[in-house]
Image (tube, helix red, strand yellow):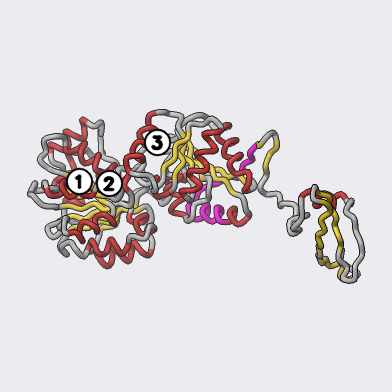
Amino acid sequence: MKKFEDLGIHPQFIRSLYEQGFDAPTEIQARAIPILNQGKDLVGLSQTGTGKTLAFILPILNKIKKENYVEALVLCPTRELVEQILLEFKKILGKNSGIRAVAVFGGSDIQRQIYAIKRGANIIIGTPGRVLDHISRKTLKLGLVHTVVLDEADEMLNMGFRGDIEKILNNTPRERQTIMFSATMSNEILSLTKKYMRSPEKLQIGTPNATISSIKQSYFICPKDKKKRALHALLTELPRGRTIVFCNTKKMVDSVQVYLRKMGFMALALHGDMPQNVRRKVMNEYKSEPNNILITTDVAARGIDVKDIISVINFDLPQNNEYYIHRVGRTGRAGHSGNAYTLLNTPEQVKDLQEIEKKTKSKITLSNLTLNGNIEKINEKPKKIGKKLNIKSREKRAIIAGRAQRTNSRNGAINVRGNSKQGTKKHTIRQTHKSKIGKIYY
C-alpha cells in the first residue's frame, strides 16, 4: 500500500495531511498524483467521495512558485463546491505557506473578490460565470496559468456552461496542464477533451456506478395529490438520521419545507434563489443536528460534503441518469450503509426509473407505503369512472350507483340532474362504447 511519501508530495503538505487525519492516499490519489506531477493532462472518472479533490490539489501546490500572479485555475459548477475546495486548499496550506487561494462566484460581493485577487492570488477557484465576468472586467488575467482543473465537468455541461468554459480556456496559455474530473463520460466530455487537452491520460476508479450499486434503493407509487402525505409517512417510518429530500424546482422545495414543518419535522430549504450568506447558514444548521432534513434542488446540492447522511429521498424523479447518480451518491459514503427512496406517480415514471436501474446496473425495488392505515399501491390502475366527465363528484357517485336520472333525447344523450344550493344543474354527457350489437349511447 502506497504512502503519501511515495507520491512526490512536498514534505510540508505531507505534514498537513497527517495533521488533518489522512493516514494514506485513496486509490485515485495514489494513481493520479504521480501522473499529474509529470505535467500530463488527465481525465479522471470517479464518483463522489473517492478523494479526487486532494488528487488535484496536491500536484497544484507542488508547482506553485509563490509569484504575484494567478498560476492555477479550478472551475466548479456551484458556489458550495467552490467553497468546499477552497477549504481543502486552506487545510493543506496552513497559515504561513505564502500561497494564496481565492474563491470567486456569483451571489457574493464582487468588489471583495477584486480586492482579494489584486492582493496577489496564486490559485483561483470559481464558477464559470463569475470567472468569465472577472475576465471581461479585466480584473482576472490568466495568461500565466500553468494548470486548469475542470471539476465535475459533466455537471457544468449539464448546467449549460460549455460556452463559458471554452471562452475561459481560450484565455489561458495553450501549453498548460488540463485536468478534468467527471462522474460520467458523455459525448460532450469527449468533445472537450479532444479540443482542449493534449493526449490526456485516462483514469477510471472503480466500476461505473459502483457507489450507488452498494446502496439499498426503493421506490413507492402514490397519487400525485398525496405525495406530500407519502413523504410524511416515509419519514415517519424511516430510522432517524440526517436526510436529504430532492425536488426538481425551487418552488417545490419551499412548498415541501412548509408542509414538513407543519408536520413537526426540522426541515431546512436550500436552493439557488437564496443569498450566499443564507445558504451558508442553512448548511451550518444542517450539519449541527444529526436528525435534520434538508430539502434542496440538484444545483444547490452540488458540493455538499456531509458524510453521515443515512437517507436520500427523491420527492421528484430526477431529470436524467446523472442526477440520479449524484443524488443517491450523497448517502452510503466512506464505507457506511445508505438508503435511497423515490416517489413516483405515473406508469411513465416507473418506466423511466427502470431505465435508470438498467443503465446504472443497480437494483431498485418496489415497496408499499401506508397512508392513514391504507396501503397505497402504485401498480393498480386508477378507476376510469368519471375521469372524463366534467361534473361534480356527487353526480359521479350517482352515475356509479345507478341513481342518475336518465331521459332520452334525439341524439341519445343523457341528462344528469344534480341538486345544488342554486337549484338544479343540467349537464350533458355523451360517451360512445363498442359492443356486440354496435354502438351504444348511454
- Per the image, is 369 magenta? yes
Three-letter amino acid code of the residue under disc 2 = Ser
For marks 2 and 3, the one nearer the N-term is 2
Quadrant hosting residue 138: bottom left
Label 2: which residue? Answer: 108
Q: How many marks?
A: 3
> How many C-alpha atoms fall within 10 Å of the one at disc 3: few (<14), some, or many (≥20)?
few
Three-letter amino acid code of the residue under disc 1 = Arg
Three-letter amino acid code of the residue under disc 3 = Gly
Of the 4 image quadrants, the one containing the N terminus is: top left
Q: Are marks 1 and 3 in contact (CB under 8 Å)?
A: no
Dot 3: what SS?
loop
Label 1: which residue? Answer: 112
Give residue 206's position: percent from left, percent from top: 37, 48
Give residue 410's position: percent from left, percent from top: 90, 71
What residue lies at 49% left-to-right and 55% top-to-bottom?
319
In the picture shown, does residue 79 fall above or below 288?
A: below
